[in-house]
Image (spheres, rainbow, N blue to C red):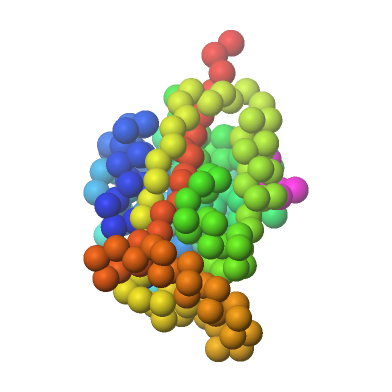
Amino acid sequence: MELDPTNQFIKAILKCSNIKDKNILEIGCGSGRITKDLAKYAKSITAIDPDDNSLKIAKENLTSNKITFIKGLGEDLSFLKDKKFDVVIYSLSLHHIPYKAMELSLKQATELLNDNGKLIIIEPDKNGSLIKAEELFNVGDGDETFVKQKAIKAIKSLKNYEVIKKDYFNTLFYFNDEIDFLENMLPDYKTKPNNLISEIKKFLNEHKENDKITLYASRNINILKKLEC
Ligand SMILES: C[S@@+](CC[C@H](N)C(=O)[O-])C[C@H]1O[C@@H](n2cnc3c(N)ncnc32)[C@H](O)[C@@H]1O
């Protein structure tokens, strides 16, 4: 699987905000996919994630001395209370935080921002063949409609901050073949009913392009800054 082969995430971030020479906090960095791109521009990145395995991969792959990886939850940022950042970014992570704690996480993130600091939040949107596959066949992250709505609601209800820019973009997913898709999106596919696997293969067949399966998913990017009194 190749995720975002045309680098739409970093293009959207650079289009909507200024991250050059900034001190960045990245919440839910996973295995460092976006951290790596941010590090090309930022002054420093503190990247947190609760998942040991993802952090291990991130640390092995990214050894820049600009980056500090820390194990931590987005809903409890108290371990960072002595730090300040120019930018806090959530890339596809806000909707993974328990929905009742999304607002709390955002509030804590704003408290870690400098006065002119910005919040950058990228969330999955509604459209795309990848999202359709997740919803139809319960593959990948499955149907995330509920948590996606909760994340947008949490962004809108954040007090003293306003969305100053919102944009949309599409990201691509390349799969070499059906097995590549199944291994990545439905790792226990061998235990699944044959009719489900046949339906998935039929769907994938409709999205073959130049010997590759190409799916896409829409994303929204939100830039927030403190309201001026
Ligand atoms: C879809 S991945 C996104 C990874 C990366 N930011 C990217 O854009 O590729 C979601 C990430 O959120 C992390 N996550 C899950 N629960 C979290 C929480 N409560 N606080 C912070 N991150 C969390 C997961 O471990 C995972 O790495």
The N terminus lies in quadrant: bottom left
The residue lying furthest to the right in this view is: 100
Image position, residue 162 (x, y; %): 56, 23
Q: Please say whether residue 40 is visible from this viewpoint.
A: yes
Image position, residue 193 (x, y; %): 63, 84
| Magenta stretch bounds | 99-103
Image position, residue 187 (x, y; %): 52, 80
The residue lying furthest to the top in this view is: 229
Q: Is residue 6 left or right of residue 75?
A: left
Using the image as rendered, state which of residue 186 and residue 95 is in the foreground: 186
Using the image as rendered, state which of residue 126 and residue 76 is in the foreground: 126
Task: State the residue at coordinates (26%, 43%).
Answer: 41
Whether 19 is among the magenta residues is no
Task: State the residue at coordinates (27%, 71%).
Answer: 211
Using the image as rendered, state which of residue 146 and residue 136 is in the foreground: 136
Task: State the residue at coordinates (48%, 40%).
Answer: 220
Task: State the residue at coordinates (58%, 49%).
Answer: 94
Q: Is residue 161 above or below residue 9?
A: above
Count of numbered labels shown in the rendering: 0
The C terminus lies in quadrant: top right
Image position, residue 191 (x, y; %): 61, 88
Q: Please say whether residue 32 is visible from this viewpoint.
A: no
Give the main secondary structure, helix, strand or loop, of the magenta stretch: helix
Q: Residue 176 lies in what quarter of the image?
A: bottom left
Q: Is residue 146 above or below residue 181?
A: above
